[in-house]
Image: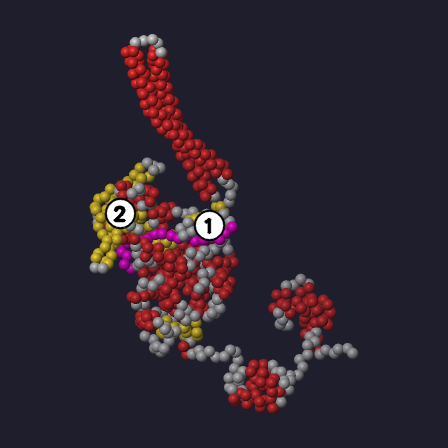
């Protein structure tokens, strides 16, 4: 018996056939899906295509039968009504189980819901209620980050970055697709994406990639996007922004924001003190890229260097990302010039940096620019206290009171030191704050040198204290931010081929070593020849002296053997005894001298031999250098851009900590601030004019009191976002905003 199909099914199959034939004719499936009246997904179209090839037109007809739903008796409906009255929270899944046990009928949960709806019952859908108070807003993770969002309302970091992107996207770049995407993005959306990248570390992420594992609502609501941006969206935006090449401009604009918000005490005429140092970050790559030295690992690894200028309050103000083989003397003055250009003022009076940047040429360049520095003398540049000339005797620098007695831990003396340039064979007398410190019952010298004159800074103790300020104001900041927000994470692995300066530098160093070894070898050869001649001459003198004595001794023995008078024989015997004694003494004397000369000659020969070996090794190293080896440099634009975001985040935290929180909290590290305050969960309720944030209360009375204080100060500041919404923060249970 032939199957009969309705006209509707035949017509639907004909429409499917047209699509399949067009597809087989070469048209793209995606365009056919858009035009077709039959709304199916790609997977379904592939299945239909397979059936069409197997069965032809008849394979396209939908043979599924809808059937009739199972009939529900009035008894079952009455049972459902009784169960709902007894337990209003009972859902369709629970009803299904009760019906199966009572009547032996298996009903679909959706069908049970429809039956209940027809009876006037509304079953609860989804998970059980969690006791959320909707009047407080949406539950979010890390509600405390709104303190930072409020701080940005004053600092205007996000606004500055957004305006820079909007401004720079008008210029032409080679990547037209990226330019089209970023030009087609509204400034408001750019701001949301910037905030997403900025606050990633606050939510436990370092890179856009980590968004793949983040499924909470806090970051999306904070940035204003609602749902958080996907990894793909955030990464594409970052890559497009990277191609605008605005990282340095963004950094300069942010520097001005920091100076206005954090460093308002700086005066144009007086200038100020700043700290300069850097850290290294690993770059995992199989390519040959310059290596950076990691102090903690005590070895060189592939990486990048980042150099920062910090204020005397520990705020990072500007940064420079460089290849791993960059050294501080090469970028020190450029970093200072870039900072002053960004600030628009000659505000740097003096800089404090590590001993790595010390050299006579740097000293002279600072004098030429009428700027000052404080740094540490390297240990290989002095032998002990005898290397310094004391000008003023020591005064107490650091004391400790114990059991009513005042104990001096550190002394500082004003001294002078002759700083030399061995290559150019010149020197200069410099001022030294010579600190003496007891370490394990031994006196340790810490020579701090400076070009600050006694007129500029008469108190040598202040010079030493400013240098020791490196630890709380820069070194500890590095450690804290690396631990808290992973500022040592590298962003971007794009590389470019560059001339292999590493091999050229190594070749130059080896050639310099060979020349130095050659000079020492020539001198060693002359000294060895001289030692050999001295030994030969001494042997000759000793042999002559010995021969003279021996001839006379032989003659005396011959005379004694002749028949002579006793008196004359006694004279000969006395003379013989005297000569033998002289010969013995000469043997002892010349023996010691000859031994010393032989040992000296042997040492000279061994030294000469070692120099020949060293020279041969260096020449072999030069010969084995791969001059054709390609060197790659990491393109640092993306890393510089993300580092600017992290530096902004550090300063926002510092600003919020000082402006809103009580003094007892000012000593907290950034990591402590994150764990105690910024990562506290809560609720957010956003309207057209305001954003109300309710943070969960604390069990710790100290933290509870600190946040209450911070909320009061924050709300009294009337903080608004860039789009004019007022942010208000309170703790759960307060019920009012201060």
Establish if 284 lies above or below 416. below
Q: Nearer the viewer, residue 272 or 111?
A: 111
Region rendered in magenta: 264-286
Q: Which mark identifies residue 237? A: none
Q: Residue at the location (22% across, 50% down)?
A: 395
Does residue 368 belong to the magenta stretch? no
> Circle 1 — which element?
strand
For disc 1, the marked residue is: 302
Horizontal side of residue 330 vs 624, given as left or right: left
**If the image is split into quadrants, where does the C terminus sit?**
bottom left
Residue 438, percent from left and from top: 28, 50
For disc 2, the marked residue is: 434
Residue 679, percent from left and from top: 40, 68
Residue 179, percent from left and from top: 49, 58
Q: Nearer the viewer, residue 392 or 436?
A: 436
Instruction: Give the crowd class for mark 1: few <14, some 14-19, many >=20 residues within 10 Å.
Output: many
Camera sees residue 414? yes
């Amino acid at each position: 018996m032939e199957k009969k199909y309705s006209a509707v099914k035949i017509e639907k199959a004909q429409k499917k056939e047209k699509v399949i034939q067009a597809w087989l004719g070469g048209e793209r499936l995606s365009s056919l899906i858009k035009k077709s009246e039959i709304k199916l997904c790609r997977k379904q179209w592939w299945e239909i295509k397979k059936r069409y090839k197997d069965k032809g037109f008849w394979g396209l007809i939908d043979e599924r039968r809808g059937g009739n739903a199972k009939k529900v008796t009035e008894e079952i409906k009455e049972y459902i009504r009784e169960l709902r009255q007894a337990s209003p929270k009972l859902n369709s899944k629970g009803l299904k189980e009760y019906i199966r046990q009572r009547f032996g009928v298996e009903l679909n949960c959706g069908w049970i819901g429809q039956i209940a709806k027809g009876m006037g019952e509304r079953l609860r859908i989804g998970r059980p209620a969690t006791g959320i108070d909707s009047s407080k807003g949406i539950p979010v993770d890390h509600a405390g980050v709104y303190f930072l969002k409020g701080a940005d309302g004053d600092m205007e970091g996000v606004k500055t970055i957004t305006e820079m992107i909007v401004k720079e996207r008008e210029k032409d770049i080679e990547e037209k697709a990226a330019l089209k995407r970023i030009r087609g993005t509204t400034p408001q959306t750019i701001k949301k994406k910037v905030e997403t990248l900025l606050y990633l570390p606050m939510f436990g992420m370092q890179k856009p990639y980590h968004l793949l594992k983040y499924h909470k609502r806090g970051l999306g609501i904070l940035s204003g996007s609602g749902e958080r941006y996907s990894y793909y969206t955030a990464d594409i935006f970052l890559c497009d922004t990277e191609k605008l090449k605005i990282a340095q401009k963004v950094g300069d604009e942010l520097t001005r924001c920091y100076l206005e918000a954090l460093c308002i005490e700086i005066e144009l005429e007086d200038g100020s003190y700043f700290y300069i140092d850097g850290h290294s970050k690993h770059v995992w790559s199989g390519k040959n890229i310059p290596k950076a030295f990691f102090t903690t690992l005590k070895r060189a690894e592939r990486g990048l260097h980042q150099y920062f200028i910090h204020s005397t309050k520990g705020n990072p103000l500007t940064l420079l990302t460089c290849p791993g083989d960059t050294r501080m003397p090469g970028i020190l003055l450029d970093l200072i010039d870039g900072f002053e250009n960004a600030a628009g003022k000659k505000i740097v009076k003096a800089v404090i940096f590590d001993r790595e940047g010390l050299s006579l040429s740097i000293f002279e360049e600072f004098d030429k620019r009428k700027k000052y520095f404080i740094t540490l003398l390297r240990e290989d540049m002095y032998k002990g206290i005898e290397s310094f000339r004391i000008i003023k005797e020591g005064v107490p620098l650091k004391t400790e009171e114990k059991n009513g007695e005042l104990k001096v831990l550190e002394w500082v003396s004003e001294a002078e030191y002759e700083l030399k340039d061995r290559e150019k064979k010149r020197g200069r007398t410099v001022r030294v704050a010579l600190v003496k410190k007891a370490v394990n019952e031994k006196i340790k010298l810490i020579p701090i040198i400076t070009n600050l004159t006694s007129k500029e800074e008469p108190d040598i103790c202040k010079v030493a204290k400013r240098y020791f300020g490196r630890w709380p104001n820069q070194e500890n900041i590095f450690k804290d931010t690396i631990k808290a927000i992973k500022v040592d994470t590298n962003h971007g692995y794009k590389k470019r081929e560059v001339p292999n300066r590493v091999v050229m530098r190594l070749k130059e160093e080896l050639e310099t070593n060979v020349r130095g070894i050659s000079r020492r070898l020539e001198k060693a050869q002359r000294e060895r020849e001289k030692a050999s001649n001295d030994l030969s001459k001494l042997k000759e003198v000793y042999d002559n002296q010995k021969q003279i004595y021996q001839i006379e001794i032989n003659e005396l023995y011959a005379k004694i053997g002749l028949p002579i008078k006793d008196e004359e024989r006694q004279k000969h015997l006395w003379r013989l005894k005297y000569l033998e004694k002289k010969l013995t003494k000469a043997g002892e004397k010349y023996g010691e001298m000859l031994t010393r000369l032989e040992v000296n000659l042997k040492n000279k020969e061994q030294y000469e031999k070692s120099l020949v070996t060293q020279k041969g090794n260096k020449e072999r190293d030069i010969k084995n250098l791969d001059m054709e080896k390609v060197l790659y440099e990491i393109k640092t634009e993306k890393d510089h851009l993300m580092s600017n975001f992290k530096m902004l985040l550090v300063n926002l935290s510092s600003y919020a900590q000082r402006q809103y929180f009580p003094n007892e909290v000012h000593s907290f590290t950034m990591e402590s601030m994150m764990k105690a305050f910024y990562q506290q969960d809560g609720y957010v309720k956003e309207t057209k004019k305001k954003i109300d944030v309710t943070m969960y209360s604390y069990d710790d009375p100290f933290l509870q009191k600190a946040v209450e204080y911070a909320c009061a100060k924050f709300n009294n500041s009337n903080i608004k976002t860039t789009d004019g919404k007022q942010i208000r923060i309170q703790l759960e249970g307060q019920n009012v905003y201060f």
